[in-house]
Amino acid sequence: MRTMVVGCFGWLLACCVSVWAQEAAQAAAARFEVLLENGVLHRGDGSPGVAGSVGIRGGRISLLPADSKADADQKIDCRGLVIAPGFIDLHTHSDEPLLDRRTRGSVNYLMQGCTTMVTGNCGFGPVDTAKFLAEIDQFGAGTNVAHLIPHGSLRAEAMGKVNRAATADELQRMQTLAEQAMQDGAWGMSTGLIYIPGTFTPTTELTAIAGVVSRHGGIYASHIRGEGTELLSSIEEALEIGRGSGCRVHVSHFKASGRASWGTLRLAISRIEAARAGGQLVTADQYPYTASSTSLEATLLPAWAREGGREALEKRLN
Ligand SMILES: [Zn+2]
């Protein structure tokens, strides 16, 4: 009997200790640095939003139910607002603004909920990825940054803006630069195949460089060779480069540009869907509006007239 009482007491004590420990843990957990209260939580995985709050402490977030009694140093009332993970802007040309003290805060992105931006798009941007990312780290930036090796700038550095295929040495040089950039933290490679010098690059050359990117698990993101009447063949080229290199493929700013190609986007989408059904990893992004923009020279002048870049073009025009 005595043993049983002690036994019961011991069990009760154990219960109390466990309740206290739980309460202490909950009290500690309930105190946050910042609390986003009473919003609608969207996890970003496609599931419907639910009422709730988010506590932030020590760089970690906790999802809390709507009736949570959590406290915080700073509370932000999110009634009527959505709380979501930061958006990723896959297609920016913020390479230079990120290094300018007037714009590196990227307030325009933050105000739209973008907390990560991808740079180096359409084949343009810094090739020296270590230097670019170190500068961002040194001075800070308003968002996270993922950088793509800009193929056009890479090619210009290795062989200039010439209208021909690369020699074996030049290709080797581009592969070495790409290897270094991937080791330095690049997320993949972008191409701009309507621009100088990207447009002068044969498919096989792109596949050979993308092969280096693929070995590091990088993505191949392309401003494809034509977005008008050449849309379908350009999609095919991107898919071929993906298959040949092993890279995941991403088609940038998907569109059917110009009246002659209107309606072909459906066919382009079905090509991508067929590739996905066949197991290839392919994605695309699209503007949320019907307009687009690029340089006049890339739109109006043939590639041969743009060889060598803008200075050479101006000489030709004169
Ligand atoms: Zn582009």
Image (tube, rainbow, N blue to C red):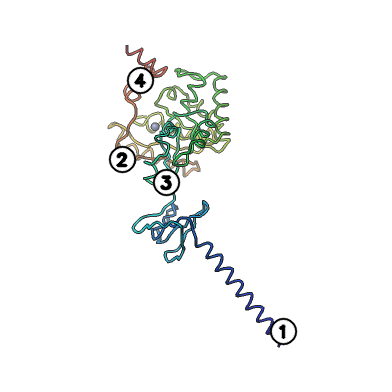
For the N terminus, give its image quadrant: bottom right
Kindly identify which residue carries mark 1: 3
Where disc 2 sits, the SS reads loop
Residue 22 sits in quarter: bottom right
Q: Marks 3 and 2, how far apart in space?
A: 18 Å
Name the residue type under label 4.
Pro
Q: Which of the two labelled residues, at mark 2 and mark 4, occupies the earlier sequence position?
A: 2
Kindly identify which residue carries mark 4: 302
Q: Is residue 173 above or below residue 68?
A: above
Instruction: Nearest to the eye among marks 4 and 3: give it.
Output: 3
Q: Marks 2 and 4, how far apart in space?
A: 27 Å
Residue 317 sits in quarter: top left
Kindly identify which residue carries mark 3: 87
Residue 256 location (% of width, % of height): 33, 35
Q: Is mark 3 within 8 Å of ligand 1?
A: no
Q: Is residue 272 above or below residue 96?
A: below
Name the residue type under label 1.
Thr
Kindly identify which residue carries mark 2: 289
Which circle marks residue 210 in the picture? Answer: none
